[in-house]
Amino acid sequence: MAARFVASNPALAPLFAAVGAGMLGASWFGFHVLKNNQEVLIARGANPTPWNNLYSPNAEFWKSRVGMPDPRSAFAATTDAVMRAEMKVQDVALKASAKVHEIKERAVGR
């Protein structure tokens, strides 16, 4: 049926060839990714957690961090950080207004 359609409309033959090649290439690429990509896990029995086998070229750095606090904890309590930042802003604003008042007093006192 498709051969008769292409025979009756020969101008569409390159379109069918291009679409067919695209579908074949997309199918091949999908199979290639499923077969070769490390992030895709099809055989669960082999190793269910392959991401735990990562190589760290900086082993001494991680050994030196033992006992140090986790830096991600600074982002865990965002409300505390926001409150501390607001207090700093208020403190800076208070110091700035005191400095402005001091400069005004010096200018008026002359």
Image (cartoon, grey):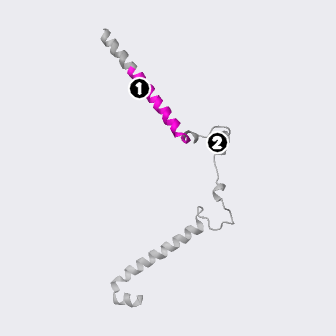
The amino acid type found where label 2 is placed reads Phe
Dominant secondary structure, magenta: helix
Q: Residue at x 65, y 68 (%)?
A: 43
> In which quadrant will I find the N terminus?
bottom left
* Residue that mark 1 sits on: 93
Q: Is residue 45 left or right of residue 15?
A: right
Q: Position of residue 17 (x, y in %)?
A: 41, 80
Instruction: Tell me which numbered mark, 2 or 1, is placed earlier along the sequence.
Output: 2
Q: Position of residue 99 (x, y in %)?
A: 39, 19
Q: How many numbered dots are placed on residues in this image?
A: 2
Q: Are marks 2 and 1 in contact (CB under 8 Å)?
A: no
CA neighbours of label 2 inside 10 A, class few (<14), some (14 to 19), many (20+): few
The quarter of the picture where residue 20 lies is bottom left
Q: Is residue 23 above or below residue 97?
A: below
Q: Is residue 60 above or below residue 53?
A: above
Q: Residue at x 38, y 22 (%)?
A: 97
Q: Is residue 58 above or below residue 8?
A: above
Q: Position of residue 11 (x, y in %)?
A: 33, 83
The amino acid type found where label 1 is placed reads Ala
* Residue that mark 2 sits on: 61
